[in-house]
Amino acid sequence: MTPHTLVLWDIDLTLVDLRGTGADWYGTVLRRLAGQAIRHVPSMQGRTERAITTELLNRHGIPDTEDEVRRVFAALVDVVAEDRELLHERGSALPGAAAVLRALADTPGVVQSLVTGNLPEVARFKLDAFGLDEHVDFEVGGYGHESVERHPLVGTAVTLAERKYGVAFPAERVVVVGDTPHDVAAALHHGATAVGVTTGRCDAAELRAAGAHVVLPDLADTAGVLAALVR
């Protein structure tokens, strides 16, 4: 069946809970690249790796040149790869995530990908650790190396999906799912449907205030989630 709906998932605190790992990984990266202990941990909620990396470098007296940013990206991928076999012990898939991904994969006309602040390699590591990678098309996602802002990632994902599948995904058929106002704002910037989930640090009122079209408590009710995502 010709694809007609594009669902773009956030990862952290939407599909998986790996709280605390990001600060640890960036601390290791900073020690390896600059020989410094981390003195300032950037806020990571809803932000891209490029935004986080730029702040990290600035706050530790390192020029945020493109070369330095890319060095951090490469080191971060290495650090997470080293931790890959332990990820399932350091966190968990959020309730209902696997069932919803599987149900959407069985829904004709739906393509699932990502709009995430993570680097592509880190995104794959995180989902693979909990068996959530099978139904996600990683080739058409928007990832955190691209921009300090989140909204360009949605545009990238839509463009890549249209190119790969040879169909248009109009704004009303693009759904962005995430746990922060950043996810909501990125969806609204492109006229897409914004679905908030309160599995992170933001409550329903914050997500509604940001403009979310739908707010879900979690992903546990598979039928309810499908009804919100595919109309």
Image (spheres, helix red, strand yellow):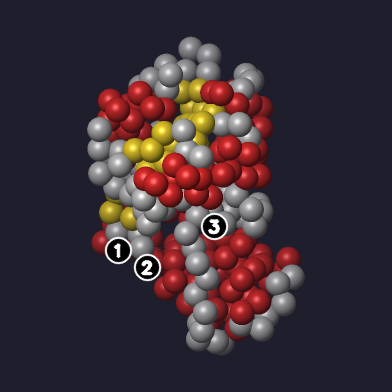
Evaluate whether residue 73 shows in this view: no
Above or below: residue 178 compared with residue 27: above
Q: Position of residue 223 (x, y in %)?
A: 28, 25
Mark 1 and mark 3: span between their CA atoms?
Answer: 21 Å
Which residue is denoted by mark 1 in the rendering? Answer: 90
Which of the two labelled residues, at mark 1 and mark 3, occupies the earlier sequence position?
A: 3
Nearest to the observer: residue 91 or residue 191? 191
Above or below: residue 168 compared with residue 176: above
Which of the two labelled residues, at mark 2 and mark 1, occupies the earlier sequence position?
A: 2
Q: Which amino acid, by three-letter code, is at mark 3?
A: Arg
Q: Position of residue 45 (x, y in %)?
A: 47, 59
Which of the two labelled residues, at mark 3 and mark 2, occupies the earlier sequence position?
A: 2
> Mark 1 and mark 2 in contact (Cβ < 8 Å)?
yes
Which residue is denoted by mark 2 in the rendering? Answer: 20
Q: Residue at x 51, y 45 (%)?
A: 210
Which residue is denoted by mark 3 in the rendering? Answer: 47
